[in-house]
Amino acid sequence: MLKIKIVPGENIDRALKRYRKKVRNTKQLKQIRDNKEFTKKSKEKREQMAKAVYLNEYKLKEEE
């Protein structure tokens, strides 16, 4: 559970903005979505490998 301390006199919009940023940084929403359905270890590993290959190719293209 995330807690945001609101400073007296602070605008509620600013507090909501800080809350959203904290949710994004802790990757809490991604965890919730991942827990909706079970994914096999092999599929997770395959996705990680595909991501690594993509990032490697991307970096190689930038160096050229």
Image: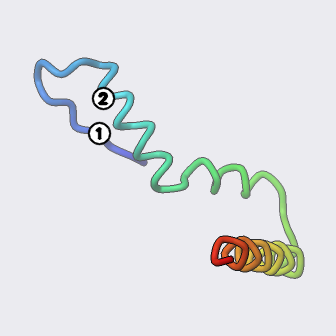
Quadrant of residue 48 within the rendered picture: bottom right
Q: Where is residue 28 in the image (x, y as percent from the top left)?
A: 55, 52
Q: Mark 2 highlights which residue?
A: 15
Q: Mark 1 highlights which residue?
A: 4
39 versus 26 height, above or below: below
User: Is label 2 in a helix, a strand or a loop?
Assistant: helix
| Residue 35 circle label | none
Q: Position of residue 38 (x, y in %)?
A: 84, 63
Which residue does the image show at 83% across and 56% down from the upper left?
37
Question: The disc labelled 1 sits on which kind of residue?
Answer: Ile
Please name whichever residue, 1 or 47, is drawn nearer the observer in this view of the structure: 47
- Which label lies toward us, 1 or 2? 2
**Mark 1 nearby-residue class (10 Å; few <14, some 14–19, many ≥20):** few
Please name whichever residue, 59 or 49, is drawn nearer the observer in this view of the structure: 59
User: Is label 1 in a helix, a strand or a loop?
Assistant: loop
Colour pattern of the rendering: rainbow
Instruction: Report the label total.
Output: 2
Q: Position of residue 30 (x, y in %)?
A: 64, 53
**Mark 2 nearby-residue class (10 Å; few <14, some 14–19, many ≥20):** some
Give the CA distance from mark 1 to mark 2.
7 Å
Tag 1 near tag 2, CB within 8 Å: yes
- Dot 1 or dot 2, earlier in sequence: 1
4 versus 13 height, above or below: below
Q: Where is residue 43 in the image (x, y as percent from the top left)?
A: 88, 74
Q: Quadrant of the C terminus?
A: bottom right
In the shown orientation, is residue 49 left or right of residue 55? right
Which residue does the image show at 70% across and 79% down from the upper left?
60
In the shown orientation, is residue 15 left or right of residue 19? left
Quadrant of residue 8 within the rendered picture: top left
Which residue does the image show at 22% across and 37% down from the upper left?
5
Question: The disc labelled 2 sits on which kind of residue?
Answer: Ala
